[in-house]
Image (tube, coloured by chain):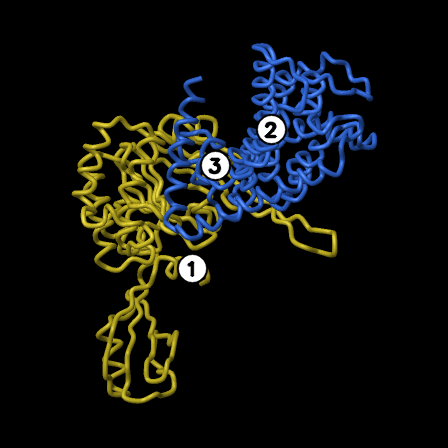
Chain colours: A blue, B yellow
Amino acid sequence: MADVRGGLRAAGYLAAAQVRSDWQYRSAFLLAFAVQAIVALANVVAILIVLELTPSLGGWSRGQVLLAYSLVGLTFGLADALFSALEDTGEMTRTGDMDRVLLRPVGSIAQIVGRNFQLRRIGKLVPPIVAFVWAVPRVDIDWGLWTVGYLMVTVVSATAIFAGLWVVSGAVGFVAVGVRRFSHSITYGGQQASEYPLHLYPRWVRLVYGWVVPLAFVAYLPVIVLTAAPNPLGIPRWLGYCAPLVALALCGAARLAWGAGTRRYQSTGR
Amino acid sequence: MAVIELEDIEKQYVVRTRAGLFRRERQIVQAVSAVNLQVNKGEMVAYVGPNGAGKSSTIKMITGILQPDGGRIQVLGMEPMRQRVQLTRKLGVVFGTRSQLWIDLPLQDSFALLRHLYRVEETRFKRNLDELVDRLDLSTFLDRPVRQLSLGQRMRGELAAAFLHDPDLVVLDEPTVGLDVVAKYAVRSFLADINREYGTTVLLTTHDLDDVEQLCERLVIIDEGRVVLDGSLGDFKARFGFERIVVVDLEAAVEPLEIDGVDVVERNGPRQHLRFDRRERSATDVLAAVAAQHSIRDVSIAEPTIEELIHRFYLE
């Protein structure tokens, strides 16, 4: 556990250094921020338009669809802001920067996440927050300690699920340098697929992006549990409480994959 | 006490070359074969060899970022790969061609960050930093962004960065590459002082004979993955260094000079590079022979690099 704390602290220092470094190029920094904000705003407008035009999707009300969208956006955004730097492993392997990471007494994930931290990625959190605020009064949730707790556990678990996916895609980068596109189909593809209710998709998409990549646990099942949304697939309700277990299992598997990736790096060198 | 112990270390790489549209041929390249090396505490060893000889592979195996394919390896009593994180706490590594500093931040920020990464306690850090700033004369540019430093200043910063956590072993990969004479001197005297005063074990690779001459009593030469010499600079010179090159500028561009026991290795207008074996002829002897044929405008003696000497030794 001391190891995790040390890693977190180190990642924090590295991230702060990265932000200070970026701040050296102020105009580029601010421009990137502005671009991110515009993109964020455009996304908010786009989702609002979609919802204006479509009163409901597959039996889900506008509020329910938007709640699912906001949960996906929020948790994916958090994981993306914190962990998407891991997709640089391939590049770092190629340039030899990975050597330096391995020469320091701090966990490699913490170092890579810290040194490649980009503050502007936080901009991706804006549209889902807007959507969340918009959606909450439009769904029927019995607010109480239990629902708030459930929501918080869901956000943490879902973030961990997405983070696990980033770690896996980073681990793949050790092995094959040019697989970024493939990794993106899982990470970004998963995010996009889970913005809409799962039952709208054909069977194979549901299988891949709902269960193999376990994104049903991120938003679809929580919205069913929280708002008693229609469940045309007849998925057992108890699965809606399994997100923490799924997150733990996925993160454990990701950790193993990462370890295998580093070991492979060490046996092939550059 | 042995700080580095390599026993019959082997390393192969699989290189895939394109042999068709989809077919690729596998080729196994032996990077390091049966390398034995023992470095004791407090030693300062130069590890030398041509590019591609296996130097970097050896260094990576010693520092735990590369797994040997065979043999036994122990560094500071640890297995580098298995105990990598533990080892890095006692290890300083400098790559002459790759910085470990944060280039957009002031130099002192890099030191502060490294303090956190290595978890050096505040008082020890302050003491070490003060000493390093003093020894390496960093005070005038501590608050300047690293990207604005000269190469010499940057390398002094790199050295400080590698020594902040009191490493027992420091590995330097070409620490003097590209530096001017003054900066080279600063790097060398720093390493010599630290080694003498603290007994820090130092392993360095270089292409510069002067580094070896001024720093290292021991020289290990690797070529094509094998250690070809492990001894003193004197041993090296006795074996390889019998060759001299004299560069003469003549009054006019003439045909290559023909002198017994002398080869013209390069000709550039009136300038000719003459190579001879100092066991057979002396430089004055050679120059007298040249002067007998043409008038000489200028003379200089070229110092061959270690690689040139080794390379030619193996070609002939």
Q: Please name the residue that numbered disc 2 is placed on.
A: A132
Are the residues under marks 1 and 2 on the same chain? no
Mark 3 element type? helix
Task: Tell me if mark 1 has few (under 14), some (14-19) or many (20+) residues whose alpha carbon lies within 10 angstroms of its own.
Answer: some
Task: Tell me if mark 2 has few (under 14), some (14-19) or many (20+) residues whose alpha carbon lies within 10 angstroms of its own.
Answer: many
Q: Which one is earlier in the sequence, the residue at label 2 or at label 3?
A: 3
What amino acid type should be assigned to the residue bearing mark 2? Phe
Residue at 44% across, 48% down? A30
Whether residue B96 is visible here, answered yes or no, is yes
- Location of residue B184 in the rendering, given as x and y in whole percent from the top left corner: 25, 54
Q: Nearer the viewer, mark 2 or mark 3?
A: 2
- Location of residue B130 in the rendering, given as x and y in whole percent from the top left corner: 18, 37
Q: Up-down: is B30 above or below B19?
A: above
Q: Please name the residue that numbered disc 3 is placed on.
A: A112
Residue B136 numbered tag: none
**As drawn, is B59 to the left or to the right of B251?**
right
**As drawn, is A59 to the left or to the right of A29?**
right
What amino acid type should be assigned to the residue bearing mark 1? His
Q: Up-down: is A98 above or below A248?
A: below
Q: State the separation of the CA atoms marked 2 and 3.
A: 31 Å
